Image: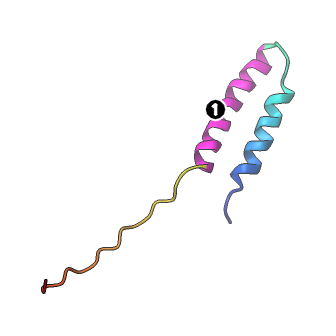
Amino acid sequence: MTSDFSAARLHLERAYHYLRGNDETSREACEALDLLIEMVAEAQHKRPVTGVIAFPRSATR
């Protein structure tokens, strides 16, 4: 099973939007959500690691 980073990011951004309070808990939660949103965005746009195929060199040129 693969992760749906796009959907996760959307839900995290919505949660951030709902935390509009000026209280300490809301501010700390928004800071934590900022970190999570950034991590998910990086994972969402990360390029897969690809292997390099080595072709044999021919002796005749």
Residue 1 placement (x, y as % from top left): 68, 66
Q: Main secondary structure of the magenta part?
A: helix
Question: Quarter of the image holding residue 12?
Answer: top right
Which coloring applies here?
A: rainbow
Residue 43: x %, y % from top left: 59, 48
Nearer to me, 18 or 48:
48
- Residue at the bottom extreme of this rendering: 60
Q: Is 60 drawn above or below residue 40 in the view shown?
A: below
Q: What residue sits 80% from the left and 42% below the top?
A: 11
Please report the residue visible at 77 percent of the width from the left and 36 percent of the height from the top: 13
Amino acid carrying label 1: it is Leu
Report the side of 44 relative to 13 (left or right).
left
Residue 2 on image: x %, y % = 67, 62
- Left or right of 14 in this view: 6: left
Q: Is residue 52 magenta?
A: no
The quadrant where residue 50 appears: bottom left
**Magenta segment boundaries in residue numbering:** 24-44
Q: Which residue is mark 1?
A: 35
Q: Is residue 20 above or below residue 58?
A: above
Tell me where residue 55 appears, x and y as whole percent: 28, 78
Q: In the rendered image of this protein, does residue 59 appear above or below residue 2?
A: below
Label 1, secondary structure: give it.
Answer: helix
Q: Residue at x 68, y 24 (%)?
A: 31
Please state which of residues 23 and 18 is positioned toward the viewer in this rendering. Answer: 18
